[in-house]
Image (cartoon, rainbow, N blue to C red):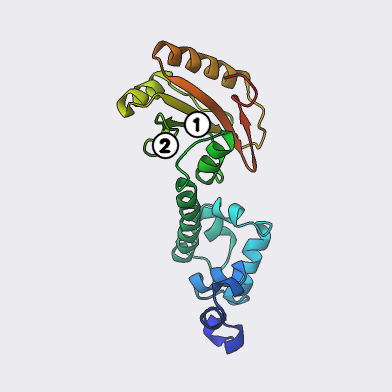
Amino acid sequence: MNIKELPIEERPRERLMEQGAAALSPAELLAILIGSGNTEETAVQLMQRLLGDCGGSLKTLGRLSLSDLTKNYKGLGPAKAVTIMAACELGKRRTMEAAAEKRKVENSTDIYNIMYPRMRDLSHEESYALYLRTDRSLEGQPFLISKGGIAGTQVDIRLVLREALIRQTPTVVLVHNHPSGNTKPSRDDDKLTEGLQRACQVMNIRLLDHVIVTDGNYYSYHEEGKV
């Protein structure tokens, strides 16, 4: 059934125009994007089922691939699936913009708040460096050092220091994520932190912190007294 076949009071687009976007459920907002469902479900019902399979989580929805959407849901072809993926990415970037508005780093929580929107939907590990001016403000965007697998990623210490010299910043912060949700650092994480700290000391650069980001939590080497 097409959305246009629904009673006017049940049409998400008309409800949005009359009541505002906040009045609609996530499924109804997604239904507006895809426009139609399939022979058994309206667009709203299809999106309700999709979100139900995601546990009602938009974050989980944002992790689905094009194949996940098109193969498992009748009525979701590539065009509709790409539209959903684009909407999820826009939501993520909006959150990243909000995080970037706070440009000064006063503590480890600030680091987490800056990096979590960027890392929250990752199913693999990524490592970034933040470069801080003398007033603790960020110099440019976070610098992607490496991408890895589910269990780890390699960090080239020389690359971290080289970027600090290019940006002419006295302070660096290392950040990486644990997709598993476990905040406990591995032995490799400890060895990396120790090696980076020694290298920074040689170059007269301060390693302020190494933060491990998970979904809703973090581990800070600085807070634990290890940096």
Query: In the picture, residue 129 is in which quadrant?
Result: top left
Q: Which residue is mark 1?
A: 148
Residue count near mark 2 (Cα–Cα under 10 Å), binned few <14, some 14–19, many ≥20 = many
Residues at marks 1 and 2, CA–CA distance in whole angstroms:
25 Å
Q: Residue at x 51, y 40 (%)?
A: 115
Q: Quadrant of the N terminus?
A: bottom right
The secondary structure type at the circle numbered 1 is loop
- Say left or right for 92 vs 181: left
Res. 149 in view: no
Which residue is identified by label 2?
138
Is label 2 in a helix, a strand or a loop? loop
Residue at 62%, 63% in the rendered image: 50
Relative height, residue 98 to residue 145 (above, below): below
The amino acid at mark 1 is Gly
Q: Is residue 26 above or below residue 15?
A: above
Give the amino acid type for the residue marked by disc 2 in the picture.
Leu
Characterize the local packing of mark 1: few (<14), some (14-19) or many (20 or more) Cα atoms within 10 angstroms: some
Q: Report the side of 190 relative to 135 (left or right).
A: right
Percent x, y of residue 69: 54, 58
Report the front residue among 48 and 57: 57
Q: Residue at x 45, y 59 (%)?
A: 86
x then y, percent, for residue 222 = 59, 25
Q: x%, y% of residue 188?
A: 58, 19
Residue 187 figure quarter: top right
The answer to which of 113 and 27 lies nearer the viewer is: 113
Tell me which numbered mark, 1 or 2, is placed earlier along the sequence.
2
In the rendered image, residue 186, in percent from the top left (x then y), is placed at 63, 22
